[in-house]
Image (cartoon, grey):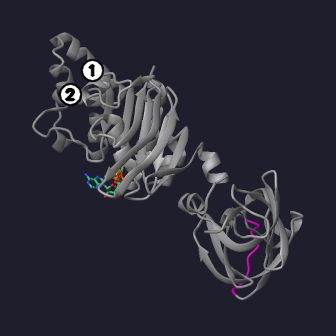
Amino acid sequence: MSDIRLENLTRTYGEARAVDSISLQIEEGEFYSLLGPSGCGKSTTLRMVAGFVRPSAGRILLGGQDVTMMPPEHRDIGIVFQNYAIFPHMNVADNIAFGLKLRRQSRSEIERAVSNALDQVGLAGFEDRFQRNLSGGQQQRVALARVLVTRPRILLLDEPLSALDKALREEMKFWIKSLQQRLGITTIYVTHDQDEALTMSDRIGVMRAGRIEQSGTPAEIYEEPATVFVTSFIGQSNLLAATCLDVSGGHASADLAGTALKAEAAQGVARGASALLAVRPENVLMGAEAEAAGVPLMDAKITGETYQGAMLRYRLDLGGQEVVAERQNQVHLERWNIGATVKIGWTPRRARLLPAG
Ligand SMILES: Nc1ncnc2c1ncn2[C@@H]1O[C@H](COP(=O)(O)OP(=O)(O)OP(=O)(O)O)[C@@H](O)[C@H]1O
Ligand SMILES: [Mg+2]
């Protein structure tokens, strides 16, 4: 069993709560990402699971067993950090064998395990190379192989791609995910990169100031963000000041600059209270498209246009509030000049009403 359970896990440094009472269940074989801005407590959480940092309060259970006070080397966990810590004075094979030698395994067992691990990370034939002759991505694969060779029941990855350039990051992202799926190993992945979290994870925990603000599948986090923080941290969103007219059963109606609109309602939205209406730029319909959608229409004025190749971004003024709309650059795309007035609207299912502040 290799599920992970955190119960009110807390770590304080003086008065500061680096991790503030996190409770979380991660299932066996799951790829769970901790996503959040710098300093929100991602690494501290991961280090507590690994056993390098002692919790101030709370419990950690691995496969149902309480390991809160267990030393790291007994937890059966593999951990890979941002900076590929492979030993420069050892070749790839020796790097990978390092952990096994400490365990006093036989020479032939070690050779078999090393070659198996190199196969797993796609580096068969690289046994004799040294760090200076490996690309960043290859070094990170060696670091992973060195961890996998000990057959950990849990894999912890702390920003393993952040030292790589963008193209390599893209490639490694899919590679790590498929490796994790093939091995079926329970994984916690720490990142501040929303694209990594969205593409790789089964579930994401969005962290802020030591707490998990929302935990859910990538689609839930992106399409049903629970708070303004999650809405603006994941992707881009227009956040428009509105007043909640009515709310019931997860649906709401709101007044936006004199127009009554329907929207999905997040927790905490109250009738009569001021609220923020969140609409992603790709969901803002314009012109003929808006009129054909049969949704409430509003007049907006074009204030800017940015050409992005595959996409066009319009900036619009809607009764004094700025709205950003993103249109796919297709053959029949309707275009407007700056200063033109255009009808805009959106499908109620694509708008969310969130409590303000
Ligand atoms: N050993 C320590 N002593 C004092 N404060 C610490 C210590 N380790 C972490 N902190 C503080 O705890 C908070 C959380 O740090 P942590 O490293 O977990 O953040 P993070 O989410 O991993 O950030 P980043 O994205 O920058 O890596 C920060 O405010 C940090 O300064
Ligand atoms: Mg960190």
Instruction: Tell me if residue 49 is in the magenta stretch.
Output: no
Secondary structure beneath label 1: helix
Q: Where's residue 204, x and y in %?
A: 53, 44
Q: Quadrant of the C terminus?
A: bottom right
**Few, some or many residues within 10 Å of mark 2 (<14, 14–19, 20+):** some
In the image: residue 27, left or right of residue 88: right
Secondary structure beneath label 2: loop
**Looking at mark 1, is its residue's CB closer than 8 Å to ligand 2?**
no
Depth check, front residue: 40 or 10: 10
Q: Residue at x 21, y 16 (%)?
A: 110
Q: Residue at x 55, y 37 (%)?
A: 202
Q: Is residue 329 visible?
A: no
Q: Are marks 1 and 2 in contact (CB under 8 Å)?
A: yes
Q: Which mark is residue 115?
A: 1
Depth check, front residue: 92 or 65: 65
Q: Is residue 123 above or below residue 284?
A: above
Majority SS type along the magenta span: loop
Image quadrant where residue 316 sits: bottom right
Magenta-highlighted residues: 331-338
| Location of mark 2 (residue) | 127
Q: Residue at x 57, y 60 (%)?
A: 235
Instruction: Tell me if residue 335 is in the magenta stretch.
Output: yes
Q: Is residue 267 above or below residue 116?
A: below
Q: Which mark is residue 206?
A: none
Q: Is residue 43 visible?
A: yes
Q: Residue at x 55, y 40 (%)?
A: 203
Depth check, front residue: 158 or 146: 158
Q: Quadrant of the N terminus?
A: top left
> Disc 1 or 2, which lies upstream in sequence?
1
Q: Where's residue 128, x and y in %?
A: 16, 30
In the image: residue 139, left or right of residue 192: left
Q: Amino acid at mark 1?
A: Ser
